[in-house]
Amino acid sequence: MKNGTRSESDTVFYFLVYFIAAIAFVITLYPFLYIIAVSFSGSQAVYQGKVFIFPVDLTIDGYKQVIKQTGLWRAYGNTLFYVIAGTAFNLVATTMAAFPLSRRSFRGRRFFNFFIAFTMYFSGGLIPTYLLTTNLGLYNSRWVMIIPGLLSTYNVMVCRSAFSAIPEELMESAKIDGANDWQIFYSVAIRLITPTLAVLTLYYAVGHWNEFFRALLYISDEKLIPVQVLLRRILIQSSGELLGSNVSSDDKAAVSIQIRYVTIVITTLPILTIYPLLQKYFVKGVMVGAVKG
Amino acid sequence: MTVKPRTAEVQKPPKYNWYVFTKNVERDKYLLLMFLPIVVYYVVFHYIPMSGAIIAFKAFKPGGGIFNGEWVGLKWFLQFFESPFAYRTIRNTILISLYSIAFGFPIPILFALCITEIPNSRIRRSVQTVSYMPHFISTVVLVGIITNFFTMDNSGMINNIIVKSGGERVDFLINPGWFRTLYVSSGIWQNFGFNSIIYIAAISGIDPTLYEAAKIDGINKFQQIFYITIPMIATTIIILFILQLGGIMSVGFEKVFLMYSPSVYETADVISTYVYRKGIESSNYSFATAVGLFNSVINFLFVYTANRICRATTETSLW
């Protein structure tokens, strides 16, 4: 038998729960829908602020205009290179750092742990790093997007805990079979931490995709800039570089706004469509990090 | 056959001498070889810049290596603290952090409490998936969205909504009074869903028999939240809160840099953006290094203290 006041307060409770969830849902989703709607709307309708949720004067002119721009595709290609090459280097280095640190028998393990962990809490700062990087001749080199960010210490810690979770007996038995530490590393240990490697791959790849500041500091060569630098010019500094030459000056302001929204869609959609498929790895990543390293 | 206890080696460290050392090196040679490039990386890209911070006490001139220059003692530090920028940048750094914590910290907890109570798993999952989405937008695109949404032009979505509901257009982007609000609220929009993951996990780890027992005792849903769920995730909440307080002196440079403009420097300029302008744009390397070093040291003290408090109160720490 149900207590009257209890079920009444539970009704209020569920109303509140659904209400808050609905607000969260709308607030997160609406900006995306609006951006997509604007990107498909006529430039004058956008300019006059007529779009609210559905496209007005449906058109794909903005997309046609943006797709023709070689500058954007070159930047996209550069970013793709930085993501793939950078992540590959990251993974090799991270596992090579994490494996020795996870071995209990490794002499100097405590010292090396401190040696790398300390850099998470103290850094020389922007200027010394900048001076060093330019002195090493990395200015306007593709390597600058790969080498200085070779390791994320946090990710090394995550990887180290994954290696530590492997039962020591497995490695011992490989050793008895005559394997040396290097062979244990690449034929036993690496294979046993693939879920963690997936998480690390995602984290590093997203990091490279979003990297902006490093490129701003060290890359001025137009041929090497990643897409985020170009996006800053188009979206925030409102430069009209994706405008075609055939646009009349009256339309310029209107078309430039439309193009900004198209650019947001083109550069954000890939990540947003891939991510729900990989969601469980991101969620797992948060949990891996939460376990004490 | 008996298995040798695996900790045997560790339990009894042999007496340390040259012979043991060479034996250990010989035994661990592959591990050491593997770790060698890592050491080189950390020395070059972390420890050399760290020692390069010495130019904060020198009059650095470009072109002669990264350590050169005459000693000038605390000249640059004094110059910074005597300028009005010290107060302005430190205040802005702390205020932006405090507002972000005050408004941004409770929301993921509230969201997690709601989401886990939704009985319908399909609704629950779709709300969750949507709520993580903004986390995957880059800072550049986020700021691009902010500037295009909040512009005073006719195309500015927010101002159009304000006008439609009978208000006046607001100069969000050039009025210093709006900067922190925009910064903090866009940060919440971007991260509340993702930051709730850890609480959702903590809540789903609670033993269900607790709730069953409570149900028999006749408590309602609100009481369940206050007497079971919140106390059960209190440790997680406390740890994350202390660690956030520890990061108070490190405001994300990128977002401020992308969002601000000279008209809002008064409320937007933080220590790291000031270092960037002084060092990279105006080439006052030593001065900017000094300001940056001040920030690093204070930041380190905050993080260290937060970590100690964390360890003392909850026996959990980063180290």
Image (cartoon, rainbow, N blue to C red):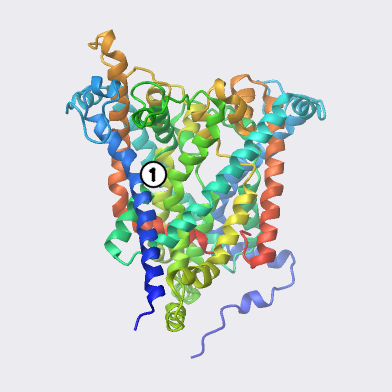
Q: Chain of mark 1?
A: B
Residue marked by disc 1 = B134
Q: Can residue A286 be seen at all in this image of the molecule?
A: no
Residue at 32 percent of width and 35 percent of height = A267
Tell me: A286 left or right of A125.
left
Pinpoint residue A94: horizontal percent, then vertical percent.
49, 52
Tell me: B239 left or right of B110.
right
Judged from this view, the residue extending furthest toward the bottom is B1
Q: Looking at this view, is B283 or B236 the one in front?
A: B236
Pinpoint residue A290: horizontal percent, then vertical percent.
51, 61
Tell me: residue B220, above or below residue B59: below
Residue at 38 percent of width and 44 percent of height = B134
Q: Quadrant of residue A114?
A: bottom right
Q: Quadrant of residue B125?
A: bottom left
Q: Quadrant of the C terminus of chain B?
A: bottom right
Crowding at label 1, few (<14), some or many (≥20) Cα neighbours within 10 Å?
many
Pinpoint residue A223: horizontal percent, then vertical percent.
37, 23
Q: Can residue A206 be seen at all in this image of the molecule?
A: yes
Tell me: residue A23, above or below residue B149: below
Tell me: A271 left or right of B267.
left
Q: Looking at this view, is B58 or A268 the one in front?
A: A268
Q: Secondary structure at mark 1?
A: helix
Q: Amino acid at mark 1?
A: Pro
Residue at 56 percent of width and 21 percent of height = B262
Judged from this view, the residue extending furthest toward the top is A249
